[in-house]
Image (cartoon, helix red, strand yellow):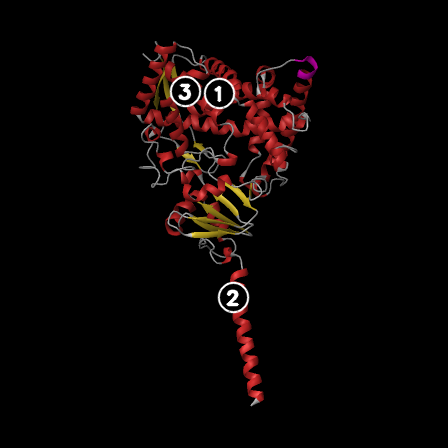
Amino acid sequence: MDVDNKFFNVALLIVATVVVAKLISALVIPKSRKRLPPTVKTFPVIGGLLRFLKGPVVMLREEYPKLGSVFTLNLLNKNITFFIGPEVSAHFFKAPEADLSQQEVYQFNVPTFGPGVVFDVDYSVRQEQFRFFTESLRVTKLKGYVDQMVTETEAYFSKWGDSGEVDLKYELEHLIILTASRCLLGQEVRDKLFADVSALFHDLDNGMLPISVIFPYLPIPAHRRRDQARTKLAHIFANIIASRRETGKSENDMLQCFMDSKYKDGRPTTEAEVTGLLIAALFAGQHTSSITSTWTGAYLFRHKEFLSAVLDEQKNLMKKHGNKVDHDILSEMDVLYRCIKEALRLHPPLIMLLRSSHSDFSVTTKDGKEYDIPKGHIVATSPAFANRLPHIYKDPDRYDPDRFAVGREEDKVAGAFSYISFGGGRHGCLGEPFAYLQIKAIWSHLLRNFEFELISPFPEIDWNAMVVGVKGQVMVRYKRRVLPVD
């Protein structure tokens, strides 16, 4: 009997131990193991990579209706968790760098920007460097930049004839590199070294390939040309910086701002840092401005009602201010602003924004579902997809600048992060005001002085580019106005 009691007690102890262990396990195991987001179903091992390479936006279009606003794609040895829509994006945009970091996911930029700047430094130094950008783009500086933009624009289009046919995309790309060179890189580059610097930037640009994201130091010809161009650019800017410092010459450009910048401990910027920051600034602005300028024109020429509204605005401003265009007058162009903003909603050049998760966190969808995102996941959102969500934007694939007009303001009705073409939160684009002023300066001049007709088919999206732009040519027929906007 004692043996039976002993056996029963031992069995009871084992059962109790198992039950307690399961209870403890349920409490101790991270919640993320219990409430992980749904996973995209793919073939084992390389299925996720194949889905991603097919096109992330294509994959999002297929999976969002099935899986909702939060889901994970297994990409080889990485998990990418997508957040789609403002309801789940607050943490993505507002989380501190210690929780969601840019540095790891954007390391592929380091060979292009160079050592010691942006993603090659720790967050505290990067924040100080971003302060240099902010100071170089404050309103007092922007006013001077606008004068340079207007001068460059007038000079460029003065070379056009009374009528003709041009590739609008080509023309805008070339003009914007000119205005960017003058405002950002300086008078010396614009006047004497433009051809050399433009060719070197072309090699830098062509060295940023999809394979570069995964293998930025792969010894391929494009990377070798990129590295050689980076070295030559560093030498050119070292000479310009030395000359300015030796002569005491000062200019109103971003180069001068970076030269004059100092860290909190009093240390001035080095030549290498100034060069790297300038390259980063040009990369951030050149493509996005030329792409958005091209889409803006294509949509205006396709939608005559909005073209008429923009022309009416220009007529009214000319009655009020004459032919003068400056920072304050550009700031009055609300109709043109909305037309640019809508083109950018439909075609954000950066289709994916990424972060690396350093800690576990939770997110709640608009349907009330809660998911726990584990440390180590790459977290992503897509402006190209989120900007077209039908529960935020009415008829989201239609070009309709009036959706941003007072009284409608669809991007504000749904709350913060409904419109993310320029990112948002802690890492919002610092160059947004510069970009709008640049595009407005160009299009106000074109609309006042030329009539246009789109003669090629409406352009398609070039999904294969690193910065997603316009595919092929955008041919327009132009005719110079006898009287501006008559």
- Kind of residue indicated by mark 2: Leu
| Secondary structure found at label 1 | helix
Work out whether mark 3 precedes mark 2 in sequence or the reverse, and give the earlier one. 2
Residue 182 visible in this rendered orientation of the protein: yes
Circle 1 or circle 2, nearest the eye: 2
Q: Are marks 3 and 2 in contact (CB under 8 Å)?
A: no
Q: Main secondary structure of the magenta part?
A: helix
Q: Is residue 194 above or below residue 411?
A: above
Residue 85 visible in this rendered orientation of the protein: no
| Secondary structure found at label 2 | helix
* Direction from residue 109 to residue 327 in the image, left or right: left
Q: Residues within 10 Å of mark 3 (few under 14, many from 20)?
A: some
Q: Which residue is mark 1?
A: 175
- Kind of residue indicated by mark 1: Leu
Of residues 46 and 448, the one drawn nearer to the viewer in this rendering: 448
Q: Which residue is mark 3?
A: 443
Work out whether mark 3 precedes mark 1 in sequence or the reverse, and give the earlier one. 1
Q: Residues within 10 Å of mark 2 (few under 14, many from 20)?
A: few
Of residues 367 and 382, the one drawn nearer to the viewer in this rendering: 367
Q: CA distance from mark 3 to mark 2?
A: 66 Å
Q: CA distance from mark 3 to mark 1?
A: 12 Å
Q: Position of residue 226 (x, y in %)?
A: 61, 32
Of residues 276 and 121, the one drawn nearer to the viewer in this rendering: 121
Q: Position of residue 236 (x, y in %)?
A: 65, 22
Q: Which residues fall within the magenta stretch?
A: 244-248
Please give the label number shown on residue 23.
Answer: 2
What is the quadrant of residue 98 in the picture?
Answer: top right
Q: How many marks?
A: 3
Work out whether mark 1 precedes mark 2 in sequence or the reverse, and give the earlier one. 2
Q: Quarter of the image containing the N terminus?
A: bottom right
- Kind of residue indicated by mark 3: Trp
